[in-house]
Image (cartoon, helix red, strand yellow):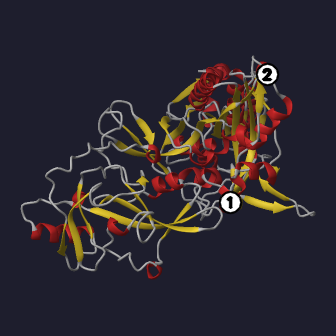
């Protein structure tokens, strides 16, 4: 970005003393108060001059590293035709998150939520031989998703900016190399942005494909829960695999028996009643099999009841469940009247499964293994069945990872107990494979003259989200503290008081710094009090704050590091060199 002198007397900027009413998180509050962004609509923001400079610095770092890894930049429209998304099924699968519209002729369009289809068709249009590959293409483009509840400022909006890139290879070995190159570029990008991050295994979700990893920024306001172990395992909670117990031989297991358990609609009341009936058994919530009914709403609008069986000491994790059943959406089940065999509070697996009399699909937690014994509903009010053996007394249609993950659960790779943390997704890399190439018939001739389907990777970074994440992770109680790599200016030069000599010297110093290649935010406002200027300097958060004021009479100015708070008085004759040394480290 070009070196400039930004004068606060003429800069399009108004700082605010009070937090905006709709600001929930520190980054939103401070970016709005500092005059970096303004709300334009729910989930949409206007970038003001200082904010746009930060945005472009993030964009520049992303672009430099993508170019350095050999990716080539293109740029698609945001307004896209329906047909490619129809071919891949995503016109329907995206459901209400997609902004759909029609032109004056009645043709269907969408505002792009992501651009796999368009990249695939572009390569298909221009390339036809293995000699053309590999190639990686990227763009930095506005995306649109109709979030039901936009929140947290720039973190979750309806309009946002992403860098999305796509690799195209002849074979899986090529995809592995492209994936590794993108992964390394992402590490360099986030290191340069100064962002703390954790790389975790993830679900591919609606994107499809096989290998998938997320770059998460750990923060208490994050919407994503992830786990890590002392031995280095890390995964988004949606992708955690349960450690499956060994199956138990059926020989010698007691027969199932139904017992009266009145007034036990909850796991707690059931465990208490069970231990009263059989005091020596030592039953806990983990001894019970809870059967949770939900409604799946498929993209075409059809509704399907689904029952999930899991140990009673665990709850269904909504995000894990949604990731498993995507693109269907999950709603609470309320239609018990239409399913009289489902006795609320006493549902047992004996009436469940696609081959049962209810025909309701039944999926179980991986801990439900053949030979495991359970207390569960007897499908009659006030009755439970004891010693119901999985695989002997009941069956299921499949296994689902939908139970909550808890601190202390074993890591699936044996690397120790899991701890849980929260984070914000900053980047996501996928090995897409051939899903989109097959749907859109992207083939090239291999070295033997045979048509082969191209294999793809998809790689995204939230550019606008990165601005919020940096603000979130570097602020203090006084305001923002931008890392120098993305700050809108290197130096905030504050001229205080009414002495004309102060402003004349500050003007000279500003010119020297700009001539030396430093971007300066110069508070040259003549009638603003020193207190207001100092508060604005703290709020705006440039890495180096230089104050020219009363000390000038003694031949000194103050240079302060915004991040550390370290101050030093510098002789006027050495001021420019001292500030340049601070800027250049």
Q: Nearer the viewer, mark 1 or mark 2?
A: 2
Labels 1 and 2 touching (C-beta < 8 A): no
Depth order, front residue of 136/309: 309
Depth order, front residue of 516/147: 147
| Occupied quadrant, residue 555 | top right
Q: Is residue 43 above or below residue 431?
A: below
Q: Residue at point 23% right, 76% down?
A: 383
Q: Residue at point 35% right, 33% down?
A: 413
- Residue 268 location in percent, x, y? 23, 68
Q: Quadrant of the N terminus?
A: top right
- Residue 371 location in percent, x, y? 24, 51
| Residue receiving disc 2 | 132
Give the SS element for disc 2.
helix
- Residue 181, visible in the rendered structure: yes
Q: Residue at point 63% right, 26% down?
A: 175
Q: Is residue 312 above or below residue 552?
A: below
Q: Left of 437 or right of it: where is 83?
A: right
| Occupied quadrant, residue 140 | top right
Q: Quadrant of the C terminus?
A: top right
Q: CA distance from mark 1 to mark 2?
A: 37 Å
| Residue receiving disc 1 | 146
- Residue 152 location in percent, x, y? 58, 56
Q: Residues within 10 Å of mark 1 (few under 14, many from 20)?
A: some
Q: Name the residue furthest left.
A: 280
Q: Left of 20 or right of it: where is 352?
A: left
Q: Is residue 183 above or below residue 216?
A: above
Q: Which mark is residue 476?
A: none
Q: Left of 230 or right of it: where is 326?
A: right
- Residue 562 location in percent, x, y? 55, 36
Q: Residues within 10 Å of mark 2 (few under 14, many from 20)?
A: some
Name which of mark 1 and mark 2 comes first in the sequence.
Answer: 2
- Residue 556, visible in the rendered structure: no
């Amino acid at each position: 970005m070009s070196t400039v002198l930004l004068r606060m007397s003429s800069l399009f900027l108004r700082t605010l003393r009070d937090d905006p009413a709709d600001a929930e998180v520190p980054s939103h509050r401070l970016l709005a108060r500092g005059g970096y962004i303004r709300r334009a609509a729910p989930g949409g923001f206007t970038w003001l001059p200082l904010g746009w400079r930060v945005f472009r610095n993030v964009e520049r770092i992303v672009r430099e590293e993508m170019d350095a890894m050999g990716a080539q930049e293109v740029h698609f429209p945001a307004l896209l035709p329906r047909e490619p998304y129809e071919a891949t099924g995503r016109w329907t699968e995206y459901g209400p998150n997609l902004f759909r519209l029609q032109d004056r002729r009645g043709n269907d369009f969408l505002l792009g939520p992501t651009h796999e289809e368009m990249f695939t068709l572009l390569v298909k249009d221009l390339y036809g031989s293995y000699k053309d590959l590999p190639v990686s293409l990227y763009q930095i483009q506005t995306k649109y998703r109709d979030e039901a509840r936009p929140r947290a400022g720039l973190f979750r909006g309806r309009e946002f900016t992403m860098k999305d890139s796509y690799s195209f290879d002849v074979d899986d070995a090529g995809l592995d190399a492209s994936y590794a190159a993108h992964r390394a570029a992402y590490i360099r990008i986030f290191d340069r942005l100064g962002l703390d991050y954790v790389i975790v295994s993830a679900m591919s979700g609606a994107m499809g494909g096989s290998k998938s990893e997320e770059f998460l920024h750990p923060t208490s306001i994050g919407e994503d829960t992830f786990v890590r172990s002392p031995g280095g395992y890390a995964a988004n909670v949606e992708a955690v695999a349960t450690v499956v117990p060994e199956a138990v031989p059926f020989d010698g297991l007691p027969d199932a028996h139904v017992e009266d358990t009145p007034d036990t609609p909850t796991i707690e009341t059931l465990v208490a009643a069970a231990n009263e009936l059989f005091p020596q058994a030592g039953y806990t919530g983990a001894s019970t099999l809870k059967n949770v009914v939900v409604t799946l709403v498929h993209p075409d609008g059809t509704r399907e009841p689904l029952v999930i069986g899991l140990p009673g000491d665990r709850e269904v994790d909504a995000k894990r469940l949604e990731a498993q059943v995507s693109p269907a959406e999950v709603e609470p089940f309320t239609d018990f009247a239409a399913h009289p065999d489902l006795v609320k509070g006493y549902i047992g697996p004996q009436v469940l499964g696609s081959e049962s009399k209810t025909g309701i699909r039944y999926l179980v937690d991986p801990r439900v293994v053949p030979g495991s014994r359970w207390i569960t509903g007897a499908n009659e009010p006030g009755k439970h069945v004891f010693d119901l053996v999985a695989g002997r007394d009941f069956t299921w249609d499949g296994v689902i990872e939908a139970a909550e993950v808890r601190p202390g659960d074993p890591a699936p790779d044996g690397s120790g107990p899991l701890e849980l943390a929260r984070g914000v997704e900053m980047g996501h890399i996928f090995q897409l494979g051939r899903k989109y190439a097959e749907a859109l018939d992207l083939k090239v001739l291999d070295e033997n003259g045979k048509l082969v389907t191209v294999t793809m990777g998809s790689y995204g970074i939230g550019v606008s989200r990165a601005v919020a994440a940096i603000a979130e992770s570097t602020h203090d109680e006084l305001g923002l503290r931008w890392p120098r790599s993305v700050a809108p200016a290197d130096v905030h030069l504050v001229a205080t008081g009414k002495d004309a000599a102060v402003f004349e010297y500050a003007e000279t110093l500003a010119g020297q710094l700009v001539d030396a290649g430093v971007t300066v935010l110069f508070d040259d406002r003549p009638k603003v009090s020193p207190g207001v200027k100092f508060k604005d300097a703290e709020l705006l958060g440039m890495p180096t704050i230089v104050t020219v004021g009363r000390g000038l009479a003694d031949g000194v100015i103050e240079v302060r590091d915004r991040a550390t708070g370290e101050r030093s008085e510098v002789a006027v004759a050495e001021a420019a060199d001292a500030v340049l040394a601070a800027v250049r480290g």
